[in-house]
Amino acid sequence: MRHCFSGLVFVLALAASPALADATAAIVNTDKKGIGKATFEQTKTGVLITVEVTGLPPGPHGIHLHSVGTCDPNFKASKGHINPGKVKHGLRNPAGPDNGDLPNIFAASDGKAQAEIFTTRVSLTGSKAALLDSDGSALIIHANRDDHLAQPIGGAGGRIACGVIK
């Protein structure tokens, strides 16, 4: 009987555990073909972003959080980075970083990229640069590596993938 009770406690503990994703983004390429997903988990101190994509050119790619939740018509309507403080772009910039700046991701030779990124500069629905605000937010992947310093986007180049955060 004692063994059964322990199993019941384990099941209840699993049911009470927090959700794996508080928000998601289906990521599409410039042809609007689905190439992956991102999940966003609000933690006590920030947001954990998990990205899984395919079909990228091999190598490093800038990835940023943009201020409007749309990928239409050509990813430009997502506007610039989330940046309520109007600071400079770049994780290495002494006058930055803005809230949308994230570390680069790296696509392997087969075009696949997986990354876990943690940021304390946004929240999902809180008072700190909320991703799920009235006009939403988008995750944008760029063609090139972000140098985390040059303006406006660190040399990251064109927008090659986009996901609306929901």
Image (spheres, rainbow, N blue to C red):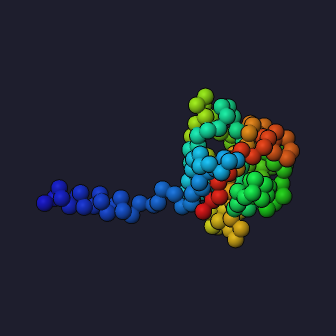
User: Percent x, y for residue 65?
Assistant: 70, 53
The correct choice, above or below, for 30 with respect to 67 in the image is above
Q: Is residue 19 visible?
A: yes
User: Percent x, y for residue 42?
Assistant: 57, 59
Q: Quadrant of the N terminus?
A: bottom left
In the displayed structure, does residue 41 sit left or right of residue 91? Answer: left
The correct choice, above or below, for 149 with respect to 80 in the image is above
| Displayed quadrant of residue 84 | bottom right
- Residue shown at the point (70%, 60%) measured from the top left: 70
- Residue shown at the point (59%, 49%) measured from the top left: 34
- Residue shown at the point (61%, 28%) measured from the top left: 109
In the displayed structure, does residue 155 sit left or right of residue 162? Answer: right
| Displayed quadrant of residue 110 | top right
| Displayed quadrant of residue 165 | bottom right
In the displayed structure, does residue 4 sit left or right of residue 85? Answer: left
Q: Is residue 113 visible?
A: no
The one of 22 and 35 positioned closer to us in this rendering: 35
Q: How many marks?
A: 0
The one of 13 and 19 positioned closer to us in this rendering: 19
User: Percent x, y for residue 147?
Assistant: 78, 37
Q: Quadrant of the C terminus?
A: bottom right
Seen as rendered, the residue at the extreme front is 31
